[in-house]
Image: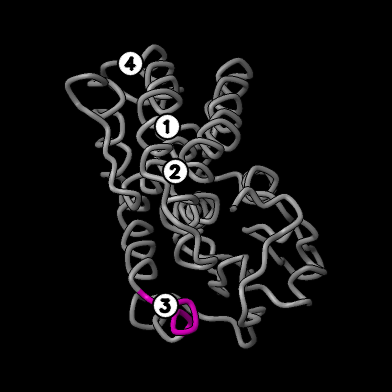
Amino acid sequence: MTIIGNTVSPYVRKILVVLTIKGIPFEIDPIVPFFGDDEFAKISPLRRIPVLIDGDMIINDSSVIAQYLEETYPFPSILPATAAARAKARWFEEYADSRMGDVFVWKGFGKMVLAPAFFGATRDLEAHKTLLATEVVEVMDYLESVTSEEGFLCGPFGLADISVAVMFKMMMYARWTPDAARWPKVCALLARAEAHPAMRLTAEWADALSRTPPPEQRAKLAEIGLRPTATSYFGGAPRRGPMSQIG
């Protein structure tokens, strides 16, 4: 099984956590999607990651991939037992992928880290300050309202917790961490989630590649215990995808 995508991406990290929990061996091509070549666009029309290749199957979108892995390798499960709890877990995954992705990944990490690093954009510190005071607060207040003081979002640790927790590292890379006094339940949930062995391991993978320039990341994989693919979709010069929100 092959994963195309960088370990820094929360969407890729979500899938790496699932693969690790289920004990599924994989190899990885750790490209940042902006650096994907023309062949990458053929397997990922939106030029987004992750992409999963399993034999003749090419699957896009982290939610679709997670569902495929759950159905193909059902044990141990990443979803709760009842239909109602599974629906709730899928809602948290959707909220994380869409709303948190928009605020934390594109508007936060994207504008403060990615756009300056890859496209020479100037950081708008006032816009970032406004983001932290408005949309980030809205996300955090919602999560605080639906998080219990103990345990996880939908019963046992699973897809809901993974999907939400992986988003926070993006804002940490943008030099923001949540205030435990203001959002104590969310911060406690994050601590419990990140303590899971699969979360700790994938966090190490993300941090290692975050400190490594994209052209050197494949060489870094063996050092951190990951198996690289034989070939890569890395294309050199960065380019935006058709739905990119990077300015």
User: Which amino acid does the dot numbered 4 rest on?
Assistant: Ser
> Is 168 drawn above or below residue 31 in the view shown?
above
Disc marking residue 148 = 4
For mark 3, give the secondary structure: loop
Quadrant (top left, top right, bottom left, bottom right) of the N terminus:
bottom right
Q: Position of residue 130 (x, y in %)?
A: 40, 30
Q: In the image as oriented, which residue stretches furthest toward the left?
A: 181
Q: What's the magenta bit mostly, secondary-structure-wise? A: helix
For mark 1, give the secondary structure: helix
Badge 4 or badge 3: first in the primary sequence: 4
Q: Position of residue 99 (x, y in %)?
A: 56, 30
Q: CA distance from mark 3 to mark 2?
A: 20 Å
Badge 4 or badge 2: first in the primary sequence: 2
Are dots 3 and 1 in contact, CB under 8 Å?
no
User: Which amino acid does the dot numbered 2 rest on?
Assistant: Gly
Q: Is residue 41 magenta?
A: no
Magenta stretch?
A: 212-218
The mark lying in front, picked from 4 and 2, is 2
Q: CA distance from mark 4 to mark 3?
A: 39 Å
Disc 4 crowd rating (10 Å Cα; few below 14, some 14-19, many 20+) is some
Disc 2 crowd rating (10 Å Cα; few below 14, some 14-19, many 20+) is many
Badge 3 or badge 2: first in the primary sequence: 2
Are dots 1 and 2 in contact, CB under 8 Å?
yes
Disc marking residue 213 = 3
Q: Residue at left 42%, top 77%?
A: 213
